[in-house]
Amino acid sequence: MEIRAQVAEYLTSRIHALRFQQTHLQHSSTTTTTTTTSSSSSSDPNLEKLPPVPSAIPTTEESDTAADSPPSEQVSTVPGGYQNISALRANTMKFFPNFFARGQLSKIFICFPDPHFKTRKHKARIVSESLNAEYAYSLRPGGLLYTITDVEEYHYWILRHFKQDDAEGPPGGSGDATAPAASGTVEKLPGVEELFERLTEEELRLDECVRVMMDSTEEGKKVTRNKGNKYVAVFRRKADPEWPLDDDDDNGCI
C-alpha cells in the first residue's frame, strides 16, 4: 500500500515485469526440455563419431574485462511466479482496516517510511499508537511487524510508540529524540505494550526477511551505496489477553 502515485506506478510496473520474466523463464525451460528430448530420440548415430567443435577462446582483453566486471545476478524461476504480490495506491493511515480482516495477516513490512522531520508533520508518520492498534487488529497472534529506517531519530520514535524500555533516544542525540510529549514522545500508558513484544537480536539474525529487507530492497541498496546506517526493529503480535471474569460472571449473571 503506497500513497504516492509515482511510487505505486513504479511498483506496479516492476511487478508486471517480474511476472512476465517468470512466465518467459518457465516457457523457455519447457521448450528446452521438449527440444532436448526430441533431438536425442532422432539423432544420427554417425554424428557421434565427429570430433567436438572447439569453443571460441576469448582474447586476453576479453578475459580481463570479464574478470573486472561484477558477476551478473542469476535469474531463476521463483515458486508462485510473483503472482502473490501486488501494489495498491491507498492511504494506509485512513483505510488500512478496510482492506484486511481481523487476524488476516502474518507479516507487515514498514520499510524506510517518510520520516517527516518537522515537528508539526509528526502526526503524518506511519507509526503511531492509534495505527499500531490497527496493525495489531489485522495481525494474527504470532504475526510479525517489521520496521526499518535509516533515520536514527525515527527508529527511537518507533520504539517509543511500541512502548519499549530502550526507547529514550540515542546518546548525545538531538532534541527530537528525547523531546517531551509536545514533540512526539508519549507517556507510558497501558495498551500497545500488551499487544506487541520486540524480537531479540538472535531472532533477527535468524530471520531471512530481515536480511532481504536490509539488502534486497531498492531503498536498502541505496542506503548501502551511500554508506548509511540501517535501524531494524521487529515486533511480534502477542495473543489477545483473556477477558477478566468477575464473581457475577462465574455465576452466570451479567
Image (spheres, rainbow, N blue to C red):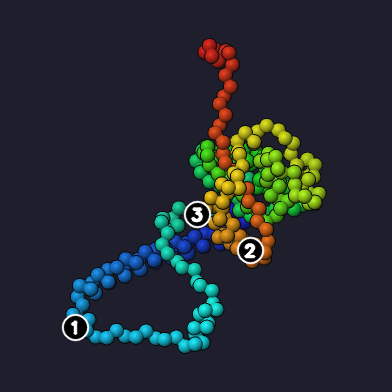
- List x then y, in percent, for residue 75: 45, 66
**Of callouts 1 and 2, the N-terminal one:** 1
**Circle 1 is placed at which residue position?**
46
The numbered dot on residue 224 is 2
Mark 3 or mark 1: whose residue is earlier in sequence: 1
- Indicate which label's residue lies in the foreground, 2 or 3: 2
User: Which quadrant would residue 253 be assigned to in this image?
Assistant: top right
Instruction: For residue 161, say whether it is visible.
Output: no
Q: Amino acid at mark 3?
A: Ser
In space, the residues marked 1 and 2 are separated at their CA atoms by 57 Å
Residue ID at (60%, 38%): 196
Residue 242 — which label? none
CA–CA distance in space, label 2 to label 3:
26 Å
Report the front residue among 146 and 103.
Answer: 146
Q: Amino acid at mark 1?
A: Asn
Q: Residue 67: x, y in percent?
A: 52, 79
Kindly state the secondary structure of the residue where label 1 is placed.
Answer: helix
Who is closer to the viewer here, 130 or 219?
Answer: 219
Taking depth in this image into account, of 98 and 135 the one nearest to the observer is 135
The x, y position of residue 4, in whole percent, is 62, 56
Mark 2: secondary structure: helix
State whether residue 215 is above or below residue 59. Answer: above
Which numbered dot is residue 86? 3
**In this picture, is 105 found above or below 33?**
above
Q: Residue at x 57, y 29 (%)?
A: 241
Front one among 1 and 5: 1
Spatial CA span between label 3 and label 1: 54 Å
Give SS at disc 3: loop
Q: Earlier in the sequence, mark 2 or mark 3?
A: 3
